[in-house]
Amino acid sequence: MADKQVVGNDAGGPNGGAGGAADPQLDGKFFRLPEFWDDGPAAWFGVVKGEFELRGITAPRSQLILVAAALPKPVAKRVAHLLSSHAPDCYEKLRAALMGN
């Protein structure tokens, strides 16, 4: 099994590395999403929804970043065109693509 990525504020600022502004929704919220379940995306997104609710993560870009970090390389390649989006519906578009909609 591949190592899971720890996601949090490592983009810069007082808690992270050099350069860039940190996402305020990720500041200090280090946690790991389970690796994406390609054979059960609906169940996986149910788990992800609970994680987001527990941590108060509501910004679509923050949600996209966290989901992207949990994608295995072949899946990430499949949806690469969506991973850099800053559109208001970026997370929903990624979710729909991963759900096969």
Image (tube, helix red, strand yellow):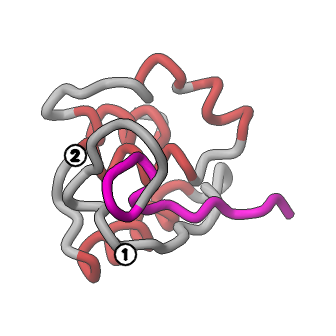
Q: Could you tell whether 53 is left or right of 64 in the image?
A: left
Q: Could you tell whether 13 is left or right of 69 in the image?
A: left
Is residue 71 a member of the stretch shown in magenta?
A: no
Instruction: Specify few, some or many for label 1: CA neighbours under 10 Å numbering under 14, 14-19, or 20 or more.
Output: some
Quadrant in the picture for residue 84: top left
Magenta stretch: helix, strand or loop mostly = loop
Q: Indicate whether 99 appears above or below 30.
A: above
Q: Secondary structure at mark 2?
A: helix
Q: Indicate whether 11 appears above or below 87.
A: below
The percent coordinates of residue 61 (x first, y second) are 26, 42
**Given the image, on which type of amino acid does mark 2 rest?**
Pro
Is residue 6 a member of the stretch shown in magenta?
A: yes
Which residue is at the far left? 88
Q: Are marks 2 and 1 in contact (CB under 8 Å)?
A: no
Q: Indicate whether 88 appears above or below 81.
A: below
Magenta segment boundaries in residue numbering: 1-15
- Quarter that holds the C terminus: top left
The percent coordinates of residue 2 (x first, y second) are 82, 58
| Residue 60, numbered circle | 2
Nearer-N-terminus badge (2/1): 1
The residue at 53%/67% (across/down) is 33
The residue at 53%/22% (across/down) is 80
The percent coordinates of residue 96 (x first, y second) are 36, 37
- Quarter that holds the N terminus: bottom right
The residue at 32%/53% (across/down) is 13
Label 1 belongs to which residue?
Answer: 51
Task: Name the residue nearer the viewer: 44 or 55.
Answer: 55
Task: Name the residue nearer the viewer: 57 or 12.
Answer: 12
Q: CA distance from mark 2 to mark 1?
A: 14 Å
The residue at 17%/60% (across/down) is 58
Which residue is at the far top? 81
